[in-house]
Amino acid sequence: MYTVGVDEAGRGPVLGPLVVTACAIPKKDLGMLKDAGVKDSKDLSKKKRQEILSWYHEQSETRGWKHSVIVCTPERIDLSLQSTGLNWLEVEAFAEALSGLELEQHHDIINDACDVKPERFTERIRAKLQQPQLEISTMSSFHKADENYPIVGMASILAKETRDNLIDAMAQRIGQPLGSGYPSDPATVNALQWLITDDGIDFDVRWGWATSIRYWNAHCRGDIPLRGASHSFQKTLFD
């Protein structure tokens, strides 16, 4: 029997994806996570996260550990904002990550709750699952599960490092430092000048985010582009 932890990274940034990861480890191996120093990714340095990640992959090869990563692109996030909203996107992504583990029996599942009502979050995920063996598994959701359950902490590390790598790849593509991608990061705010212009908005930016909308209204002409719709702007008589 596995114990499964599920967590996300990147709910709030204006740049890059939302990443959800499910991590499954046999119950007998859970103590190894604590011994290795696994914690919530926010409580670990970049160097320590990378050390733990390398250790995790080494153990996975020999001990049957599993993980599943779902990358929700900025486009998917924007389209969700136009329809069901971010909370439902996270429900879908958590269910997809669990299904991606391809587990074949009853297991204990612990989610880091992305809803003010953890029980509602659990039931919504359960309703989205397509595999009977997961539907009958014991599932619970808790706030700060990544701080209190090492298995969820491991999922948070996998999600965080995946997202960081994608932000690094974006920075290399743009040729400019992007910072963390969060609106509170001065480097991220500074990078918007290359990412949001009159010609449009970079595909790795969340177009529907308030930060993007404010920047567009302050620096660009016309209506802000909408995902799924062609973009144009009207020139005035005095342009």
Image (spheres, helix red, strand yellow):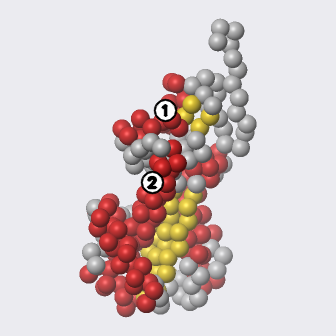
Mark 1: secondary structure? helix
Question: Horizontally, is 232 left or right of 22 in the view?
Answer: right
Q: Nearer the viewer, residue 50 or 73?
A: 50
Q: Check the image and report above or below for 132 versus 218.
A: below
The amino acid type, in three-letter code, at marker 1 is Gln
Nearer to the camera, 47 or 108: 47
Q: Residue furthest right?
A: 230
Asked if one can make out residue 59 in the rendered structure from this viewpoint, the answer is yes
Q: Which residue is mark 2?
A: 168
Q: Is residue 117 left or right of residue 36?
A: right
**Amino acid on which disc 2 is placed:** Asp
Quadrant of the rendering where the C terminus is positioned: top right
In the image, residue 70 above or below residue 215: below
> What label does residue 65 carry, if any?
none
Q: Residue furthest top?
A: 238
Secondary element at tag 2: helix
Residue 193: mark: 1
N-term-proximal mark, 1 vs 2: 2
Residue sitting at 69 percent across and 9 percent down? 237
